[in-house]
Every structure is written in structure tokens, then in C-alpha cells.
Image: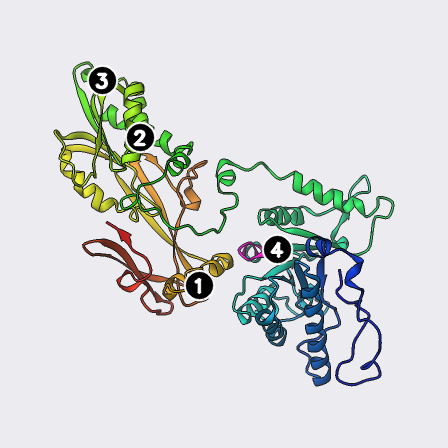
């Protein structure tokens, strides 16, 4: 809803309307406070030209803009919609920044940005003139308009995007770039709709596909324009958009599990230093893929360990180090039954005394004397015999942040010379990441006393992901290209970069990472050396350490 009638141009500097009497806009009494604060999004006047070269127009626009923002705050509307018309956004950003600094009401500001600039929407009618690709020129790339605006506003978390869908869509690369931005609503004009065989309004396949992708961001929709299907009524547009929403494919297990946690930072677990809660174990155990893959790996290891001709006479010894509440123990026993191989003894080693209670109960109720429960830190345990197979899941987010080297080095002496370790190897991958939401979440973190590494972001961050090889061809992966279908219990880890940097397509990024160890802690230090050198982050573990 317009905050002020869009045809009502005010004059604040001079002119015949400068001292015009009467109310500027409707009274706040036309709706209740609850309705204003829950049902209405305000919209600034379209005639405002904040970056006009004409001094009077610019100053008049500034005064009108500030007046409308002040009244929107008075009404307590949840959001105000304002439009970017070009890449010249500095003065508008300055005025909004001033309002953000002085306002007490935590209002959202939705910046309406078209997918394609008006200049690029005009057809080239000059013969012989070559067309340029949309987005090649940053001046005409509307994403750069938005990026300049949010940078000038210091990436304030109250400044978000209202993405205006245009008749022509840019390249898939440009569309995907918008998916990493804080898009709060999508503006759809009735002029975009086609007419199907039954006379109802529909969108093109390309528009449908992109809008369904935006649905994953929990956006709101704004429908604008005249009714172009009067025989069907304006409600037919709403019905069609409702149909698009309802026709989304059902979420897979990963999406269901992670709903609400997309682009959400969590402190990495430290199971070596802390005792995990029962709820945490339960979440991991619900993973439908990880433990089935572990069982498959143990099954093949048992087949290799005991040939068919020796299965009646030979037995194996297994050790599960970091047994938790027993999912790997259950997987190992099931694998032994599946392979028809005898397990003489299975040692389940767990340092968390609360989880040991669960293990002891499961031994009494299910496993019997075949399983020995060891309540001890695996690094301090003295095993009575050596194992044929050692099984662990200390991989963390990238194979190292749960201190698997320290833990597995402590038990390696209990593995027979020709024994098998599951997992047998893992590979970590590093990738640059762009996420405005994570940017603000770290930059505006609650702990103001922490050093900048935990407070700043980064137009580019470093995402570390993992592919472990459990045994032979049995793998797990959180690398997007090879992600294990249905697995949701592993998330990537983020190494934040304090200084923003742009990366051009094809450029090489060189990163140095150090793993540092003291008597009590392990920590990482990192820096980027190419294409630009930045300071070393987290020196001496001042922002984050892992307790030994």
C-alpha cells in the first residue's frame, strides 16, 4: 500500500504547494494497530528521485522520502518497499542509513530490484549494431545495483530484496546468484502471464521454474498490474500462484531435516571435550544412509578378512571407538550376520558416561557377552588384545575438526599389522562461498567481545566439505556433485574471511591453512594468498579452538 498517494507530490523547498494545508495521507485510524503491523507493507512514492542532478528535485525527494519512512515507522508496518531505478544509489542509501540509525522500530526495508535493467529490456532496433549479453556491463547488471546499495548500508540485516520478475530472464548464472541473496518477496506483474487453452492466466515454463526455486527461500508474492483476464477475474492469478506453490515436489529427507537451518551457522560439536546430549545422538542415528553404508563397509571387510573356506573356524575381533549410543555396534553385528562370519569379541569404547548407560542396557537386552563396553577415553585405554577391524566416525565436517588424528593415533597401536580401519581414508575439498545471510549472522553476532574473525564477513568465505572412503568402493560424501542421496547428518564447515573479495570466473584462489596444536587445544589459522593477499585469521586460536 502506498504510504502517500503516488500522485501527491509535495514541495518542501519552495513552490505554490509548499504550505498547502491538510493531511499528507490517510489517518492511521482507518485500520487497527494490529492490522497495520501484520497485514500492510508500505510503499514509497514512485516520483522520488534521490539521485537527481537537479538540486531542488534531489532535496525535495530526500524530504519526501524521510517523511514517508517516518510515517511508516509511526504505523508500525512490518516492511517498506522502495524501488531502485538505476545503479546510482548512493544518496538513497545514505538517507535510508540515517533512518536506520535513528529509528527505534525494527522495520524491514525491501529494495525492489528488477531481474533485468530497463535498458536491457529494450529491443535493439539499430541494424548492424551487435547486441551485448545481459549482465556483461556492471552498470546495467541489476545485481550490482543491489550489491552497491547493501554495501553502502553496511549489509544491514533489515535491508532485503524484493525481486521484480521481468518478461525476459537473464542467464542461469545470474538467476542462481539471486538465490544466495536475502530475497523476502517477489514482484510479479500481470503482464507476464500467458493465456492457456481454457483462457486462464499461466506463466511460461522458465518463469515457473525460477519462481519455484524462490519458493525455497520462504518468499512472499506481490501481484501488480491490471486484470488482463477480466472474464476469469483477478482472483484467477492468485489461484494460479497458489497452484504453483502447492505443486512443488515433496521435500526429500535432507530438505525435511534441514528446513529452517538453511544458511544457518551452528557451533561445531566437540565430542572429545564435551559429552553430547541424548537428543544430539538421536538426530545422528536417524540418518538413513550413513549407518547403512557403514554396515556395507563392515560386511565387505569381514568377507575379505575371513575367506569362505575359513568361516567355520576363524573369528574376528572388532573395536568400535567412539561408540555413542551404539549405532555402529548394531551395524557391525548386523554385518557379521549378513556375511555369515563369526565375531568373537566386539569392544565398544565410549568416554561419555551418560552414553555408556545406554550401551550397558543394550548389552544386557540385545548383545550379550559378545560385546564388552569400555567406559574410557580411547586415547588412555589399554586394550587386552589387538583388533582385526577398528571402526570410528570421528570425521566431523571435514575429517579433522573432531580431532580424529589424535584419537585414532591413540588406538592405532591396537590394530593388527594387516588390520582394517573403517573409514580407511577421506578427502576434504575447499570452495569459495557467497551468502549474505551468513555474512550478517557472523558480522552481527551477539558476542561483541570476540575478535573480527567471528564478527566480520566476507563476500567470499571458504566452505570445506568431505568425502570419506569407508572401505574399498563404499563411500560417503557431502560434496554437492557426489552427495550421498538421503544423508543429512553431516554439514560443511565455514572458514570466514574478514575482507570481502570479488572472484572472476576462472580465477585461481590459493589458500593456506595451518593446523596448530598446544597442550590443551587444537586450532586452525588460515589466509588467502591469491588473487589477493589477506591477513592470517585466528592467530593463536584467539577466536576459536578445539579442546583436547
Marks 1/3 in contact by CB < 8 Å: the verdict is no
Q: Residue furthest top?
A: 312
Residue density around tag 4, few if under 14, some if 14–19, many if 20 or more, within 10 Å: many
Quarter of the image where one finds residue 198: top right
Identify the residue under disc 4. Answer: 184
Identify the residue under disc 2. Answer: 328
Identify the residue under disc 3. Answer: 308
What element does badge 2 sit on? helix
Residue density around tag 3, few if under 14, some if 14–19, many if 20 or more, within 10 Å: few
**Alpha carbon distance from label 3 to label 2:** 24 Å
Residue segment shown in magenta: 175-183
Residue density around tag 2, few if under 14, some if 14–19, many if 20 or more, within 10 Å: many
Estimate the x, y position of residue 280 in percent, counting from the top left.
Answer: 39, 39
**Alpha carbon distance from label 2 to label 1:** 38 Å
**Alpha carbon distance from label 1 to label 3:** 58 Å
Identify the residue under disc 1. Answer: 457
Estimate the x, y position of residue 161 in percent, counting from the top left.
Answer: 61, 60
Is residue 150 left or right of 168 when viewed as pictured?
A: left
Which residue is rendered at x = 66% and y = 54% of the image? 186
Label drawn at residue 79: none
Marks 4/3 in contact by CB < 8 Å: the verdict is no
- Whether residue 374 is visible to the viewer of this picture, yes or no, is yes
Which residue is rendered at x = 72% and y = 74% of the image? 64
Q: Earlier in the sequence, mark 4 or mark 3?
A: 4
Relative to 420, does residue 258 appear above or below in the rendering?
Answer: below
Amino acid at each position: 500500500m502506498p504510504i502517500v498517494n503516488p500522485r501527491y507530490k509535495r514541495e518542501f523547498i519552495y513552490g505554490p504547494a509548499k504550505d498547502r494545508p491538510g493531511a499528507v495521507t490517510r489517518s492511521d485510524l482507518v485500520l487497527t494497530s494490529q492490522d497495520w503491523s501484520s497485514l500492510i507493507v508500505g510503499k514509497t512514492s514512485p516520483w522520488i528521485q534521490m539521485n537527481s542532478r537537479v538540486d531542488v528535485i534531489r532535496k525535495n525527494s530526500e524530504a519526501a522520502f524521510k517523511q514517508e519512512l517516518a510515517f511508516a515507522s509511526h504505523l508500525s508496518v512490518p516492511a517498506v518497499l522502495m524501488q531502485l531505478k538505476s545503479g546510482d544509489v548512493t544518496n538513497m542509501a545514505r538517507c535510508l542509513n540515517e533512518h536506520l540509525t535513528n529509528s527505534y522500530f525494527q522495520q524491514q526495508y525491501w529494495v525492489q530490484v528488477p531481474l533485468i535493467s530497463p535498458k536491457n529490456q529494450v529491443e535493439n532496433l539499430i541494424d548492424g549494431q551487435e547486441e551485448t549479453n545481459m549482465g556483461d556491463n556492471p552498470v546495467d547488471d541489476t545485481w550490482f545495483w543491489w550489491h552497491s546499495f547493501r554495501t553502502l548500508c553496511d549489509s544491514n540485516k533489515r535491508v532485503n530484496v524484493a525481486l521484480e520478475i521481468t518478461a525476459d530472464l537473464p542467464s542461469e548464472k545470474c538467476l542462481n546468484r539471486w538465490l544466495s541473496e536475502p530475497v523476502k518477496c517477489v514482484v510479479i506483474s500481470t503482464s507476464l502471464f500467458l493465456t492457456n487453452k481454457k483462457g486462464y492466466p499461466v506463466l511460461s515454463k522458465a518463469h515457473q521454474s525460477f519462481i519455484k526455486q524462490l519458493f525455497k527461500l520462504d518468499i512472499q508474492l506481490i501481484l501488480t498490474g491490471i486484470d488482463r483476464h477480466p472474464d476469469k477475474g483477478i482472483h484467477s492469478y492468485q489461484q494460479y500462484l497458489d497452484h504453483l506453490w502447492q505443486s512443488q515436489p515433496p521435500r526429500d529427507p535432507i530438505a525435511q531435516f534441514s528446513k529452517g537451518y538453511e544458511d544457518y551457522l551452528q557451533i561445531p560439536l566437540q565430542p572429545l571435550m564435551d559429552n553430547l546430549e541424548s537428543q544430539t545422538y538421536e538426530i545422528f542415528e536417524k540418518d538413513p544412509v550413513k549407518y547403512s553404508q557403514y554396515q556395507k563397509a563392515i560386511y565387505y571387510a569381514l568377507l575379505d578378512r575371513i575367506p569362505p573356506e575359513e568361516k567355520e573356524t576363524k573369528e574376528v575381533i572388532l573395536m568400535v571407538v567412539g561408540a555413542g549410543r551404539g549405532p555402529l555396534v548394531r551395524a557391525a553385528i548386523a554385518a557379521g550376520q549378513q556375511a555369515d562370519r563369526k565375531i568373537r569379541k566386539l569392544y565398544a569404547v565410549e568416554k561419555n558416561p551418560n552414553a555408556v548407560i545406554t550401551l550397558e542396557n543394550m548389552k544386557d537386552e540385545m548383545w550379550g557377552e559378545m560385546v564388552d563396553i569400555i567406559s574410557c577415553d580411547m586415547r588412555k585405554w589399554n586394550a587386552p588384545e589387538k583388533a582385526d577391524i577398528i571402526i570410528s566416525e570421528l570425521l566431523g565436517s571435514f575429517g579433522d575438526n573432531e580431532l580424529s588424528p589424535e584419537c585414532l593415533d591413540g588406538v592405532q597401536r591396537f590394530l593388527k599389522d594387516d588390520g582394517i580401519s573403517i573409514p580407511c581414508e577421506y578427502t576434504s575439498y575447499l570452495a569459495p562461498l557467497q551468502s549474505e545471510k551468513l555474512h550478517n549472522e557472523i558480522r552481527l553476532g551477539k558476542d561483541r567481545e570476540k575478535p573480527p574473525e567471528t564478527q566480520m564477513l566476507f563476500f567470499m568465505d571458504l566452505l570445506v566439505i568431505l568425502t570419506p572412503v569407508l572401505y574399498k568402493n563404499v563411500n560417503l560424501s557431502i560434496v554437492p556433485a557426489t552427495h550421498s542421496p538421503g544423508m543429512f547428518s553431516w554439514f560443511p564447515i565455514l572458514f570466514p574471511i574478514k575482507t570481502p573479495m570479488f572472484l572472476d570466473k576462472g580465477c585461481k584462489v590459493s589458500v593456506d591453512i595451518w593446523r596448530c596444536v598446544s597442550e590443551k587445544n587444537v586450532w586452525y589459522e588460515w589466509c588467502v594468498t591469491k588473487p589477493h593477499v589477506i591477513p592470517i585469521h585466528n592467530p593463536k586460536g584467539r577466536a576459536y579452538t578445539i579442546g583436547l
